[in-house]
Structures are given as structure tokens and as C-alpha cells.
């Protein structure tokens, strides 16, 4: 480990590669770079400290540099022990940006780094999974009066925040960036779909065509994953607890069944729910020899790994991100230790899709600053016009031009008198 007064990374000598990867990401994040240029001129975040617990990837580095361009001081750590890209962390450290993180963090280091972010005393928090917010509320409530607000990136984090809100435990406003259409309908759908398949293939090098894939959960992430698997020639089964999502899956041509039945016929299983123990030991006991299990929810509890370790007769690592467990004479394979497979075994979402997600984060931070003291301590969605602005920036980056309403059409849409 290489350490400095404001960083702790695996190897500072990886910085040169990290800088090149960040440059490549910037080329594919034109929408966010447009915001960065405006921030450089206007400095809307001058004097603001932003504390971040996000995946430390090349795309996140572009967000960090965007916030700094806006005048903010930034400190960042990872939000998942296996998601940090060590070359990117080194690049940020080399540029004298506060960063703590490495791929394969121990649980102790993970929370020690979160503590470093908290001791940075941020005015705004950016979270992916709500661990930073939870730590502040649980252990450092004295910091809350100075916190303007926060932004949450993921479905899992929003679930936790709404639980806090329901319990009257949330003490500062949190913007649900995940609820932007330009986030969950792009990032979760297209990003998770592609990067999850990428992670499973990198971990296993398995052919998807002809396989039976079980997608556990059919929210935006599950929809994207199922679509990509179908496109690669797989037979897809969906398990769901939500009636409408199950209905959508059926209308989208996928088989819908209980996990107790799907577990017997699936070749590859992927959890995408944000919930706990979606794949349990009773399911694993019924699986085929050679079944592959992966998770693309947030935490490593969607698959009951601890339960599997207790009942397995042996365990070994057969590839860098693939563990083999022997169970009743058959083999069960776990990708990426049951953590986010798209980041543990691959590189996360493509830069293009993260551009719109991080436009949402950058503009949410600006929105918090502009509305300091005006927002309630609740989960808040960004105004629709900001979401529309982000979509417009991405269309411009793709050189796509939309139609415009005529004056007659505007008048018609604004009236109610004209009918048949």
C-alpha cells in the first residue's frame, strides 16, 4: 500500500495508466464535460466540501474533476470492497485529490476510509448504497447541522433512505439521483444489462447462447440484464415478488416462475433485487452441477454466501473472480465473491451511460447548494426540467436533433376546449 497525508492506494506507480483511462472516459462523457466547462466559468460550488462514497472508477474520476472545476473540494472513497480501479485511485492521488481505496479492501479498511470521508466534514455527501449517510446518522450526528444535503446513486440506497425517512431518522435532505429517468432508465437498464453480462463472461468465459439464465428481479436492472441475455441467445427465466414486474416480464416473452422451481433448471443465476438472501442454501442444494451464481444488486447478501460456506465440503478459487464450492458432490460457482459482478470482475458501466448518471450527480450537488436551507429532510427528486436538460446534453453529444413543437401544437397542448 502507498500512503500519503491525503491518500491511501494500492500502488501510486499505476497513476500513468489511470490518467490515460480517465482521458478515454472523458472522450465518451461529452454531456458531463459540457457541465464541467460551465462549472469552470461559474464556480457554483466554491467553498463547498463534497464527500463521496462511490465506485472509484475512471468515470467517477471525471465526476470528481467536474465538481472540483466547479470550485468544490472533494474527498472520495469506494462504496464496495471490490469496485475500486487501482490505477484510477493512483491517478487521483497523483493529482493531489483526497482518495482512499483499493480493490479487495478488508471490511476494516472499508469503514476506516468512510471515517476519513466523514472527518473531512463534507457539506454535501454523494453516496452509492447509503453507507456514508448511515455512518453519519448513526455515529456522527454532530456533523449534520453543517451538511446542506446529499445525493444517492442507487436503487438500494434509495430503499434504505426511504426506510430512514419512514422512521423519522433522516436528518438532512437527500436527492434521489437514481430516480432520474436519465439514471435508472439508462444506467440501470442499459448499463447494468451490458456490464453484468460482461462481468459474468470475464469471470467464467462461458457461452450464453443456449443457456438457461435466471434473472432474480425484474426492475430496471433485471430488465436490462434479461434483454441482453436474450440478445445473446439465452433462454431467460424471471423470478419476481412484484405482480406488475412479473406481468411485464411475461409480456416481454420471459418465463416467470418461483425460485424453488427455477433453481432446478437454471445454468446461470443473477440477483438484481437489492434484497437479502434471494438465493438461499435450499435453492443451491437443488441446483445443477456446474451452476454459476452472480450478483448485480448492491451488497453481497443477495446470495447467501455465508450459508453456502457452512454447508460446502470444499472451497477453492479457480479463476481470479470465480470461486468453486463443492456441495453434495456437485460444483457451484460464485462470481466476484457474490459482490457486484460488473465491477468486481469487469469495469462497471460503459462511460457513455455513466455520463448521464453523473450529470445528474453534478447538477444535484449544484441544486443542493442553490437551495441551501430550503429543502426538507426527506428523499427528494430533481425537477423534471433538469432531467430533460441532461437528456438534451446527451442527444447533442450524439449529434441527434429532435423535432420542435409548432406554435399551433403548443397552443393545442395548453388548451382543453378543442376536441373532436
Image (tube, rainbow, N blue to C red):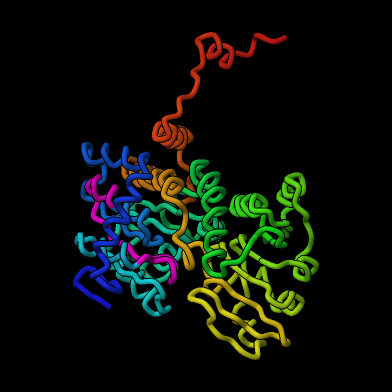
**Residue 78 falls inside the magenta stretch:** yes
Quadrant where the C terminus sits is: top right
- Residue 233 vs residue 350, the one in the foreground: 233
Quadrant where the image shows the N terminus: bottom left
- Which residue is found at the position 59% from the left and 53% from the top? 221
Range of magenta residues: 65-85
**Residue 382: x, y in percent?**
45, 41
Residue 154 versus residue 238: which sits nearer the camera?
A: 238
Query: For residue 377: magenta?
Result: no
Query: Where is 203 relative to 59, above or below?
Result: below
Residue at point 57%, 53% (across, down)? 193
Percent coordinates x, y for residue 42 in the rendering: 23, 37
Quarter of the image for residue 285 reads bottom right
Residue at 42% x, 58% y: name it: 127
Q: Residue at x 53, y 14 (%)?
A: 410
Residue 3 pos. (x, y %): 23, 75
Amino acid at each position: 500500500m502507498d500512503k500519503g497525508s491525503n491518500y491511501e492506494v494500492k500502488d501510486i506507480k499505476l497513476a500513468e495508466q489511470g490518467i490515460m483511462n480517465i482521458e478515454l472516459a472523458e472522450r465518451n462523457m461529452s454531456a458531463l464535460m459540457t457541465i464541467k466547462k460551465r462549472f469552470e466559468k461559474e464556480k457554483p460550488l466554491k467553498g463547498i466540501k463534497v464527500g463521496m462514497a462511490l465506485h472509484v472508477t475512471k468515470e467517477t474520476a471525471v465526476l470528481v474533476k467536474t465538481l472540483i472545476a466547479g470550485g468544490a473540494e472533494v474527498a472520495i472513497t469506494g462504496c464496495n470492497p471490490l469496485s475500486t480501479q487501482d490505477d484510477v485511485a493512483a491517478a487521483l492521488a497523483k493529482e493531489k485529490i483526497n482518495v482512499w481505496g483499493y480493490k479487495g479492501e478488508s471490511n476494516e479498511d472499508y469503514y476506516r476510509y468512510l471515517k476519513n470521508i466523514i472527518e473531512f466534514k463534507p457539506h454535501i455527501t454523494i453516496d452509492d448504497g447509503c453507507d456514508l449517510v448511515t455512518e453519519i446518522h448513526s455515529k456522527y450526528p454532530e456533523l449534520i447541522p453543517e451538511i446542506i444535503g446529499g445525493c444517492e446513486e442507487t436503487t438500494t440506497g434509495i430503499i434504505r433512505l426511504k426506510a430512514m425517512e419512514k422512521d423519522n431518522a433522516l436528518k438532512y435532505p437527500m436527492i434521489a439521483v437514481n430516480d432520474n429517468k436519465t439514471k435508472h432508465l439508462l444506467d440501470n437498464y442499459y448499463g447494468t444489462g451490458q456490464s453484468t453480462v460482461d462481468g459474468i463472461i470475464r469471470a467464467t468465459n462461458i457461452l450464453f447462447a443456449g443457456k438457461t439464465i435466471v434473472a432474480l428481479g425484474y426492475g430496471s436492472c433485471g430488465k436490462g440484464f434479461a434483454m441482453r441475455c436474450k440478445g445473446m441467445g439465452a433462454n431467460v427465466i424471471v423470478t419476481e415478488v412484484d405482480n406488475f414486474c412479473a406481468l411485464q416480464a411475461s409480456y416481454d416473452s420471459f418465463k416467470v416462475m418461483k425460485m424453488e422451481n427455477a433453481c432446478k433448471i437454471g445454468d446461470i443465476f443473477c440477483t438484481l433485487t437489492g434484497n437479502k438472501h434471494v438465493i438461499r442454501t435450499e435453492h443451491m442444494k437443488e441446483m445443477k452441477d456446474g451452476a454459476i451464481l452472480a450478483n448485480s444488486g448492491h451488497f453481497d447478501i443477495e446470495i447467501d454466501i455465508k450459508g453456502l460456506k457452512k454447508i460446502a465440503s470444499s472451497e477453492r478459487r479457480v479463476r481470479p473472480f470465480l470461486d468453486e464450492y463443492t456441495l453434495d458432490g456437485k460444483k457451484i460457482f460464485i462470481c466476484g465473491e457474490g459482490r457486484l459482478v460488473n465491477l468486481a470482475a469487469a469495469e462497471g458501466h460503459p462511460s457513455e451511460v455513466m455520463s448521464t448518471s453523473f450529470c445528474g450527480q453534478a447538477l444535484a450537488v449544484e441544486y443542493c447548494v442553490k437551495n441551501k436551507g430550503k429543502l426538507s429532510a426527506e428523499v427528494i427528486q430533481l425537477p423534471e426540467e433538469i432531467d430533460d436538460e441532461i437528456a438534451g446534453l446527451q442527444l447533442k453529444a450524439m449529434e441527434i436533433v429532435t423535432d420542435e413543437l409548432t406554435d399551433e401544437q403548443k397552443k393545442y397542448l395548453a388548451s382543453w376546449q378543442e376536441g373532436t
